Image: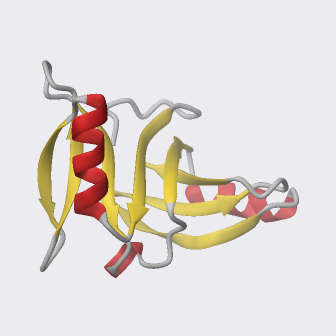
Amino acid sequence: MSDSNEVGKIGWIDMTVDDAPGVRDFYKAVVGWETDDVDTGGYSDYVMKMPVSGEGVAGVCHARGSNAELPSGWLIYIVVAYVEASAAACTSNGGRIVVEPRGLAGGRFCVVADPGGSIAALYQP
């Protein structure tokens, strides 16, 4: 996740896919990103990094384990103050919860769909 915990900021972006190594290699070749493996217990997901600074800018994850229920494709993580309150506001404003609030990276997150059907994650540091 981003070092910034400012509410409303896009704090991270990643994707969940069936062929994480293939997608990792695609972005290495097309964008020039470097990678680090992230051990997820029996397999690795990947942090995609800027080639010069080494700053992590995105993740490529396998569609299994805790990511099995996440939709395929790029997913932005928007920083919120309280994930449960934001999840409740989502449903009361015409959206739906795709993944219920749970722990992630020392904080909490959930995945929501807005009334138009677009998917985003909400992340509370």
Q: Position of residue 121 (x, y in %)?
A: 55, 54
Q: Residue at x 47, y 50 (%)?
A: 124
Q: Position of residue 74 (x, y in %)?
A: 49, 50
Residue closer to the observer: 5 or 18: 18
Residue closer to the observer: 10 or 124: 10
Q: Residue at x 68, y 69 (%)?
A: 97
Q: Residue at x 66, y 61 (%)?
A: 112
Work out whether 12 lies above or below 66: above
Q: Residue at x 21, y 27 (%)?
A: 50
Work out whether 30 lies above or below 44: above
Residue 125 seen = no
Colour option used: secondary structure
Residue closer to the observer: 95 or 48: 48
Please state if 83 lies on the left or on the right of 16 as rendered: right
Q: Position of residue 78 (x, y in %)?
A: 54, 42
Quarter of image, res 28: top left
User: Seen from this angle, which residue lies furthest top?
Assistant: 52
Work out whether 43 lies above or below 60: below
Q: Position of residue 42 (x, y in %)?
A: 12, 80
Please state if 113 lies on the left or on the right of 18 as rendered: right
Work out whether 62 lies above or below 109: below
Count of numbered circles on the image: 0
Please state if 120 lies on the left or on the right of 125 as rendered: right
Please state if 34 lies on the left or on the right of 74 as rendered: left
Residue 54 seen = yes
